Image (cartoon, rainbow, N blue to C red):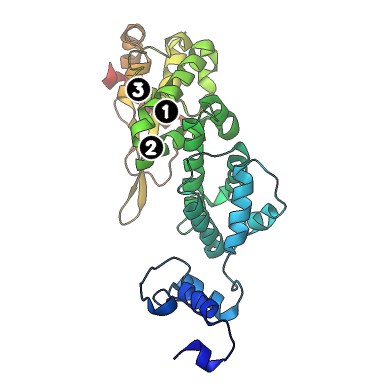
Amino acid sequence: MRVASVEPGVNAEGVVRLLSYMYPGVTVKGINQYVGHERAASDESYLQRYLLLAVPEGDVSDRLIEDVLNALAGDLYVDSKKDLASIMDGPDWDLATLAFSKSLEIRKAANTTSLTLIDFLRARVTARDLEDYDLGSPIVPLKGWMNREIALGIRTELLSIEDVVQRFGEAETVRIINTISRMLEFKNEFAQVANKAASYWIANIRSNPAGVGNKESLAPIIHLVYSAPEVRSETGLLDDAINSFEDYVAIAQKFVIFNRWVGSGVHYEMEFMKKEFEFAVSEEVRDIYRDEALEESPFDLENTEELAEPDVAPEIMRAFTLRALAISV
């Protein structure tokens, strides 16, 4: 039925253009060419908007997201960012996840970023930090988005590794670098990023060996250095931090990790990162403490393979470490 015959005098072409946008396949002047798009009425995410002529409850305005992201990416202030932040930080996980998913869709083609946008995302992560990776938590798509923006920042030299550490801390920076390594988009550039990160931590450790004992993320840092293709010759990185047998054991304890296993239940198993330890502590230093490690190594060791929690008493940690050192030497 022709629009003009239903409502004489109406701008029929304009009506049909609107219908062709809402329903791909309805076109002007008899041309029937189906071109789908994400905002068509056939998309269940948008159908209610056409029925209500408004953004439905439980949905997020595309215009709000676009306006805020465009401003943040341009290092501009926009007052409506507090409205988007309240959605992203709010208790409605479905709504927050939708906001993050739409944001990722908008930003997926971007090849530059800004510190303003990265700091906005850091604030969102902080607001949801206690949720960790609970099933269904919006922090999963949020961290994926933030990691991509950081990767763009490193690629464009907007961010140095030191900048990332200052903003997120060492532990989170290591996780971010490892996440970037799994992004196909940055696959060809990861070696360069890993080398930058490794070079930063090599310089940091060598300039302050006394501070090694305070690094909670020492083992993951050494693993990253060990894995970086251009710096694998940097063996013995921790030698200057070891001045006694107790130093030796204390640093070795930082290479004990708890692997999480999920089966009929969840349990944890202790593991010593042998190759990373032997990379970071030279054979020359290990030879100095070889006999003492063997002498103190326990004959019997409590179960360390079926732990209910990723934690043990200090005496068990020491015994496990001494046994690992005895085997290592």
Q: Residue at the spot x=52%, y=75% of the render? A: 18
The mark found on residue 186 in the picture is 2
Figure check: 295 above or below 299: above
Q: Is residue 252 visible?
A: yes
Reading the chain from its start, which is encountered first: label 3 or label 1? 1
Pinpoint residue 290: horizontal percent, then vertical percent: 32, 11
Reading the chain from its start, which is encountered first: label 1 or label 2? 2
Q: Secondary structure at mark 2?
A: helix
Question: Quick check: 234 left or right of 128?
Answer: left
Residue toward you, 3 or 172:
3
Q: CA distance from mark 3 to mark 2?
A: 20 Å
Q: Residue at the spot x=57%, y=70% of the render? A: 58
Q: CA distance from mark 3 to mark 1?
A: 14 Å
Q: Residue furthest right?
A: 79
Q: Secondary structure at mark 1?
A: helix
Check disc 3: other Cα within 10 Å, few if <14, some if 14-19, many if 20+.
many
Residue toward you, 29 or 267:
29
Quadrant where the N terminus sits is bottom left
Pinpoint residue 281: horizontal percent, then vertical percent: 37, 14
Q: Secondary structure at mark 3?
A: helix
Q: Name the residue beneath numbered marker 3.
A: 226
* Badge 1 vs badge 2, beta-carbon distance below 8 Å: yes
Q: Name the residue beneath numbered marker 1.
A: 193
Question: Quick check: 119 left or right of 185?
Answer: right
Q: Residue at the spot x=55%, y=81% of the render? A: 51
* Badge 3 vs badge 1, beta-carbon distance below 8 Å: no
